[in-house]
Image (tube, rainbow, N blue to C red):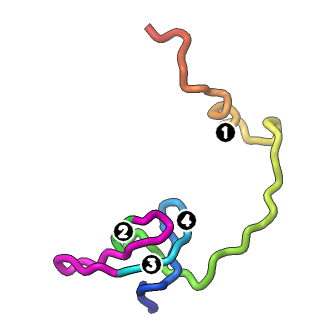
Amino acid sequence: MAEIREDSLVRYKGTGTIGTVKVLLEDDGVTWPFWTATGLYYRLGFLELIEKAPERKELEGMTLEQIPGEVQADARYDGCSQDAG
């Protein structure tokens, strides 16, 4: 199994964001990769090594009628309640 090293291409598991590890910092037996995508240090468990960035596919726009019902309800909610009291 390959290890994350300096200049490794990695993906953040939480969001799928891709970036490169610039530096590895060792502190109290824990390795902290410095990630170029955010300029922050992460625990190794939050990043996964990838061979190459996935190719972007053409995105097709959707109308409100094409979006499933639950997402439509969220899109219409503006976060403000007229009846707050």
Q: Mark 1 or 3, which is nearer the eye?
A: 3
Q: In this view, does 3 lie above or below 17?
A: below
Could you tell me how far apart the alpha carbons at marks 2 and 3 are, in whole angstroms?
10 Å
Residue 54 lies in the magenta-colored region: no
| Circles 3 and 4: CB atoms closer than 8 Å | no
Picture residue at 62% right of the left edge, 27% below the top: 77
Picture residue at 37% right of the left edge, 72% below the top: 45
Mark 1 or mark 3: name the one nearer the start of the chain.
3
Q: Mark 3 or 4, which is nearer the eye?
A: 3
> Would you name the residue on which mark 2 appears?
42
Q: Mark 1 or 2, which is nearer the eye?
A: 2
Judging from the image, what secondary structure is the residue with disc 3 in?
Answer: strand
> Would you name the residue on which mark 3 appears?
21
> Residue 81 location, x and y as percent?
53, 16
Query: Going by the image, does 73 lie left or right of 47?
Result: right
Quadrant where the C terminus is found in the figure:
top left
Residue 28 lies in the magenta-colored region: yes
The stretch in magenta equals 24-39
> Would you name the residue on which mark 4 appears?
17
Picture residue at 77% right of the left edge, 66% below the top: 57
Picture residue at 43% right of the left edge, 79% below the top: 22
Q: How crowded is mark 2: few (under 14 residues within 10 Å), some or many (20 or more)?
A: some
Could you tell me how far apart the alpha carbons at marks 3 and 4 are, in whole angstroms?
13 Å
Q: Say which quarter of the image contains residue 41.
A: bottom left
> Would you name the residue on which mark 1 appears?
71
Amino acid beneath label 2: Tyr
